[in-house]
Image (cartoon, grey):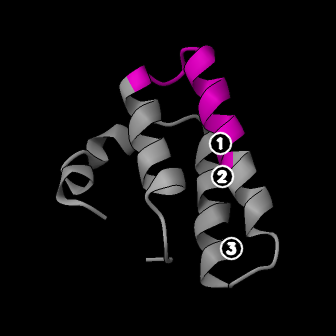
Amino acid sequence: MTQDLREKTYLEVDLPGYLTHDIEALVQGEKDDVSYVDCLLDEVYGSINCAEVDREITPEQALYLRQKYLWGRSTPE
């Protein structure tokens, strides 16, 4: 994770429950090396988009979450 992302972890506070659930499932799935990680990525992507459209998270939060969990991941932490 880049330094910029580490400094913005406050953007992960008070996320909708369904988004938190999907992120946790993705992180666990990557740790467990499951074969369906692509499905978990799709779930996170969809949940971020829904939360942003429904104004449950800000555009800044959505961008941060996409960068951290979708675009910037190469290996599980």
Task: Give the secondary structure at mark 3.
Answer: helix
Horizontal arrangement in the rendering, residue 24 relative to residue 65 (left or right): right
Horizontal arrangement in the rendering, residue 67 relative to residue 25 (left or right): left
Q: Looking at the rendered structure, which numbered label has been put on residue 29?
A: 3
Query: Do the residues under discs 3 and 2 have CB atoms within 8 angstroms?
Result: no
Q: Earlier in the sequence, mark 1 or mark 2?
A: 2
Residue at the spot x=58%, y=48% of the render?
Answer: 20
Give how far across and how far down residue 33 sits, in percent: 69, 84
Amino acid type, label 1? Tyr
Placement of 56 over or under 4, stated as above or below = above
* Residue tagged 2: 21
Q: Is residue 14 magenta?
A: no
Q: Label 1 vs label 3: CA separation?
A: 15 Å
Magenta segment: 44-59
Looking at the rendered image, the quarter that the N terminus falls into is bottom left
Residue at the spot x=43%, y=77% of the render?
Answer: 77
